[in-house]
Image (cartoon, rainbow, N blue to C red):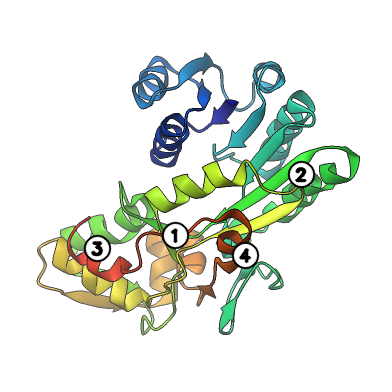
Amino acid sequence: MKIFLTGGSGYIGRATIGELVRLGHTVEALARSERAEAAVAAAGATPVRGGLTDLGVLNHAAAHAEAVIHLAQATTGEEDLAAATAMQDGVGGGTYVHTGGSWVYGDTDGLQDESAPWNPPAIVAWRRAAEDAVLARAGSGGRPVIVQPGLLFGGDNRLIDLFFVRPGRESGAIPYIGDGGNHWALIHLDDLARLYAAALSAPAGSVYLGVGGVNPTAREVAEACAHAAGLAGKTVSVTLEQAREQMGPIADAFALDQQLTSAKAQRELGWTPGHPDPVSELAAGS
């Protein structure tokens, strides 16, 4: 299958390109710079020069593909929806896989799936309009699918590393918010890449949580990261107010208590997470 992909130079994108190529697909990937072109080419894709606001480029590339996977992170909901619209117009009846996120469900009050009500923190509240519009295409011959990744580990550990590990190395202790008893819905990078590939065969209008089904507490994650960082397991509690000052509005997302299951994706797509012990992997620095 010929697939057009955005966000290919990022760590999720590179892993997804690798998985798609391994499965025998041909991939073209959006690249806004020479550095991005080199990254997607190294991952196994053919670069398509342009950015997420180049709607003509997106439409043309999607029109020459059999499926689209949209991984790039837009700066606003309007930008994300405009890009999605251009690519859905282009791919027509081909599968269009859109990236959402698990934070939109807010605090879950126990284990939940895709049927849980939305209660997003402000930083991701914009996703509702975009995802509703994407899914609406199923009623007019489109094949939209949404994947909602949890918090990633493995690979670069981008958010965990950026907001917790790096500051922790500087201060001598990895932070967690409050008492750290809130749960995080994690997924390994390789498992997420396999889920995106599996989603190409999903029924139109499907929504899948991209989580590993293991939901450790934020304090457990902090302790594991503290061992991996050579800090002898040292952690420190910060208040939500302190976290907001240090991290910005994303602190409210990190403070969520989320327990989520990917049973639907496993049941419908035959996909199984392969990393059932994220705390041990994080402690080992993998």
Distance Cα–Cα, label 1 vs label 3: 14 Å
Q: Nearer the viewer, mark 1 or mark 3?
A: 3
Could you tell me which secondary element the residue under label 2 belongs to? helix
- Relative image position of residue 169 (x, y in whole percent): 17, 59
Query: In the rendered image, which quarter is residue 93 located in?
Result: top right
Q: Are marks 1 and 3 in contact (CB under 8 Å)?
A: no
Q: Are marks 4 and 3 in contact (CB under 8 Å)?
A: no
Circle 2 sits on which residue? 134
Q: Are marks 4 and 2 in contact (CB under 8 Å)?
A: no
Query: In the rendered image, which quarter is residue 179 located in?
Result: bottom left
Q: Residue furthest right?
A: 140
Could you tell me which secondary element the residue under label 1 belongs to? strand
Could you tell me which secondary element the residue under label 4 belongs to? helix
Circle 3 sits on which residue? 281
Inspect the image, locate mark 3, and give the three-letter code of the amino acid beneath it. Glu
Mark closest to the chain's N terminus, 1 or 2: 2
Circle 4 sits on which residue? 264
Q: Nearer the viewer, mark 2 or mark 3?
A: 3
At x 76%, y 47%, the residue is 204
At x 75%, y 23%, the residue is 90
